[in-house]
Amino acid sequence: MLNEKLHSYIDGLISERNPLLTEMENYASVHNVPIMELSGIETMLQLLRIHRTERILEVGTAIGYSALRMADALPKAHIVTIERDVERLQLAEEFIQRSEHRNQITLIQGDALEVEDAVKEHASFDAIFIDAAKGQYKKFFEIYSKYLSDDGMIITDNVLFKGLVAEPEIETKRIRNLVKKIDEFNHWLMSHPGYHSVILPVGDGVAISKRRGESI
Ligand code: SAH
Ligand code: MG
């Protein structure tokens, strides 16, 4: 990973977000909502722009910050986003209603492991963004990659988990188990016969997966 100084330098060059997004960033910071880190989200948005993405599925809405960032960066895009926490989804709804992007975002309430039928109606997707319970990444990937368009990409956040994936010894059992799950996911993903993947050491670690051509 880049060192702290360089991270702050880069973050300092990123222009301010609009007042609503800034309010959401502050809310997330005060209430410990794990929204995507700045350098991670900027990287993802740039990839989505290059890819000219129009149909996006997000697993893990939280308060709607990343969904709104995507809607803002990609005026033609539509985002379907899943959140199981009712209170967070309610907040997301309120923030989205206050934005100019309410028509670009469809919220689905429920556990992503259980709402496949509702999501399916909106398929296919040019991009799928996985940013929910870290222990379930493989399941999310397996369920929703079925609805990825042929040239689509899957973006997975937090694959380096604050650098802990590279730590040999972790004290807390819960964290150790979670790190093990992420590490297993990373190995599984990087050797998946159906996808080319790369892990970028930006933000909290972002994996980009692209379907392999006809070769599978
Ligand atoms: N993408 C958001 C942050 C998401 S934080 C952003 O960057 O702005 C992760 C969210 O995933 C949490 O709000 C959590 O409630 C939700 N989540 C975790 N597991 C889930 C599941 N199985 N189904 C749906 N949502 C889930
Ligand atoms: Mg995340």
Image: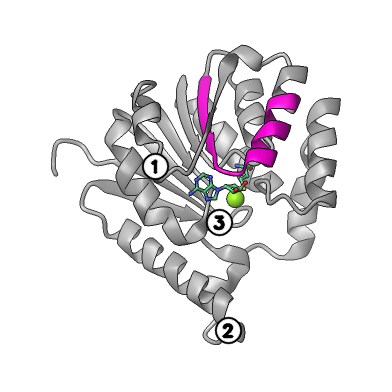
- Residue drawn where x is 41% and y is 41% of the image: 154
Q: Which circle marks residue 158 in the picture?
A: 3
Dot 3 amino acid type: Asn
SS category of the residue bearing label 3: loop
Instruction: Using the numbered discs, state the Cα–Cα distance from disc 3 to disc 1 in whole angstroms.
Output: 22 Å
Measured as percent of width and height from the top left, residue 11 is found at: 77, 47
Task: Specify the quadrant that holds the C terminus.
Answer: top left
Residue 66 placement: quadrant? top right
Asked if residue 24 lies left or right of residue 90, the reply is: right
Instruction: Using the numbered discs, state the Cα–Cα distance from disc 1 to disc 2 in whole angstroms.
Output: 32 Å
Measured as percent of width and height from the top left, residue 56 is found at: 47, 27
Magenta includes 90? yes
Label 3 packing within 10 angstroms: few (<14), some (14-19), many (20+): many
Asked if residue 160 lies left or right of residue 195, the reply is: right
SS category of the residue bearing label 2: loop
Of 6 and 128, nearer the camera is 128
SS category of the residue bearing label 1: loop
Measured as percent of width and height from the top left, residue 139 is found at: 35, 52
Of 50 and 67, nearer the camera is 67
Q: Tell me: is circle 2 under 8 Å from ligand 2.
A: no
Question: On the image, numbered disc 1 is attached to which residue?
Answer: 114
Question: On the image, numbered disc 2 is attached to which residue?
Answer: 170
